[in-house]
Amino acid sequence: MEKPTQIQWRLGERLFKDRNLSRTGEVSCADCHQSENFFADGRKRSIGVEGREGLRSAPSLLNTVYHESFFWDGGSRNLEGQALAPFDSWIEFDLDFEIARERLM
Ligand code: HEC
C-alpha cells in the first residue's frame, strides 16, 4: 500500500473522528479505536450507538496495514472493507452508507 499524502492523511483522520457517520451522531471510529489506547478500546465488549454492546473488544489498529487477515477470528481478509463494516453493523454505526455519504456533502 502506498504512503498516504498529507491531504489523504488529514481527510482520513477527520473521517475517523466524525461522529456524524453514526446514525445517532454519537459514535466515531475513534470512540472504539482510541489513539490513547493504541487504537483499541480497552473494554471487554465495544459500545456502539444507543449504548449497544458488541460481542467483542475493539482490537488495536496499529500496523493493521501489514496484516493478512482481520477480526479476532481472522474472518476478514480485506482492509478497505473494514472501513465500511461499521455502517452495516446494528451495534456500531447503524447507518446506511449512502445516507452517511449525503451527510458529508
Ligand atoms: C462500536 C465500536 C466500533 C466502531 C465504531 C468501529 N469499530 Fe472497528 N472494530 C470493532 C471491533 C469490536 C472489531 C473486531 C471485530 C471482530 O473481531 O469481530 C473491529 C475491527 C476493526 C478492524 C480490524 C482490525 C484487526 O486487526 O482485525 C479495523 C481495520 C477497524 N475495525 C476499523 C474501523 C474503522 C475505520 C471504523 C470507522 C469507520 C471502525 N473500525 C469503527 C469496533 C468498532
Image (tube, grey):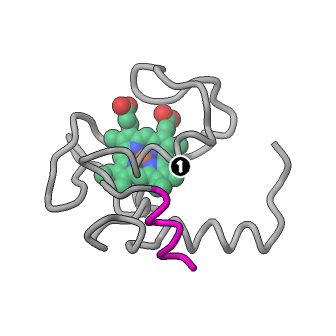
Question: In percent of the image, x 40 and y 51: which residue is there?
Answer: 87
Residue 39 seen: no
- Answer above or below: position of 59 versus 98: above
For this rendering, which residue is in front, 60 or 28?
Answer: 28
- Quarter of image, ligand 1: top left
Q: Which residues are magenta?
A: 97-105
Question: In percent of the image, x 47 and y 56: which residue is there?
Answer: 97
Task: Examine the structure image and report whether residue 102 is included in the region drawn in magenta.
Answer: yes
Q: Quadrant of residue 81?
A: top right
**Neighbours of disc 1 within 10 Å: few (<14), some (14-19), many (20+):** few
Q: Quadrant of residue 21?
A: bottom left
Residue 104 seen: yes
Query: What is the x, y in percent for residue 35?
Result: 47, 62
Question: In percent of the image, x 49 and y 60: which residue is there?
Answer: 98
- Answer above or below: position of 99 versus 32: below
Residue 14 appears left or right of 55: right
Quadrant including the C terminus:
bottom right
Decide if ligand 1 comes within 8 Å of the CB at mark 1: yes
Q: Which residue is mark 1?
A: 83
Quadrant including the N terminus:
top right
Q: Quadrant of residue 69?
A: top right
Secondary structure at badge 1 equals loop
Task: Examine the structure image and report whether residue 13 is included in the region drawn in magenta.
Answer: no
- Answer above or below: position of 24 versus 85: below
For this rendering, which residue is in front, 97 or 74?
Answer: 97
Query: What is the x, y in percent for residue 13?
Result: 59, 69
Query: What is the x, y in percent for residue 85?
Result: 45, 43
Query: What is the x, y in percent for residue 56?
Result: 26, 35
Q: Mainly helix, strand or loop, the magenta region?
A: helix
